[in-house]
Image: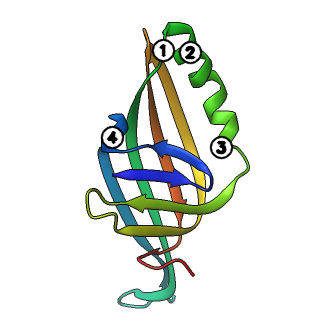
């Protein structure tokens, strides 16, 4: 699986040994709870808004320990203030899916020797199978 956020590759896929680990998708609708004074029950109203959160980890191999550390230090700021579609491409089928209007909630980066690991939480609208 390949994952990119705008022009930034987060997971380069099988060829580069950068597969997402612990890939999770959470969907949630915006629901308003209505209650009345002395009412016997509440009522849930679906407001029709969907948000989808995608979480995953990626391990990246670097030429040396310093490169891994530098990448970990720079990477979070590279994603700051960006809003774009998150592109998820299945392998080997190359079937693309898009998390529309996505924003990075958080990035946690660590480095150990010449390897860096990054944990992403990205939120957006619906996941669709066609770029619009």
What is the C-alpha distance between the residues marked 1 and 3?
Answer: 23 Å
Q: Which residue is mark 4?
A: 15
Tell me, yes or no, if residue 127 can be seen here.
yes
Secondary element at tag 1:
loop
Please give the name of the residue rendered at 64% of the width and 62% of the height, measured from the top-left corner: 84
What distance separates the C-alpha of mark 1 from that of mark 2? Answer: 6 Å
Q: Give whichever of discs 2 and 4 has the lower sequence position.
A: 4
Q: Is residue 121 left or right of residue 78?
A: left
Image coords of residue 94 (percent x, y): 34, 63
Q: Is residue 51 left or right of residue 71?
A: left
Mark in the foreground, 1 or 2: 1
Residue farthest toward the front in the current orientation of the protein: 15
Q: Is residue 9 above or below residue 76?
A: below
CA distance separating discs 3 and 4: 24 Å
Residue drawn at (40%, 51%), measured in percent from left and top?
2
Secondary structure under tag 2 reads: helix
Q: Nearer the viewer, residue 93 or 77?
A: 93
Q: Label for residue 63?
A: 1
Q: Which one is earlier in the sequence, the residue at label 1 or at label 3? A: 1
Q: Do the residues bearing badges 1 and 3 touch, measured as CB atoms within 8 Å?
A: no
Secondary structure at numbered mark 4: helix
| Residue at 42% across, 91% down | 39
Pointer 3 residue? 79
As measured in the structure, the alpha-carbon distance from the residue carrying label 4 to the one carrying label 1 is: 17 Å
- Figure check: 62 above or below 56: above
Contact (Cβ within 8 Å) of mark 1 with mark 2: yes
Q: Please indicate, yes or no, whether residue 18 appears anywhere in the rendered image.
A: no
Identify the image quadrant of the C terminus.
bottom right
Residue, disc 2: 67
Counting other residues with Cα less than 10 Å from the Cα at mark 2, is it few (<14), some (14-19), or many (20 or more)? some
Quick one: label 3 or label 2, which is nearer the N terminus? 2
Q: Earlier in the sequence, mark 3 or mark 4?
A: 4
């Amino acid at each position: 699986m390949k994952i990119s956020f705008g022009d930034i590759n987060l997971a380069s896929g099988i060829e580069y040994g950068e597969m997402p680990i612990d890939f999770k998708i959470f969907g949630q609708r915006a629901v308003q709870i209505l209650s009345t004074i002395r009412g016997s029950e509440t009522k849930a109203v679906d407001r029709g808004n969907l948000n989808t959160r995608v979480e995953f980890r990626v391990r990246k191999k670097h030429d040396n320990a310093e490169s891994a550390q530098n990448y970990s230090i720079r990477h979070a700021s590279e994603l700051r203030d960006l809003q774009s579609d998150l592109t998820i491409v299945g392998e080997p089928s190359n079937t693309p899916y898009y998390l529309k209007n996505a924003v990075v909630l958080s990035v946690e980066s660590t480095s150990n020797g010449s390897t860096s690991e990054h944990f992403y939480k990205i939120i957006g609208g619906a996941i669709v199978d066609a770029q619009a």
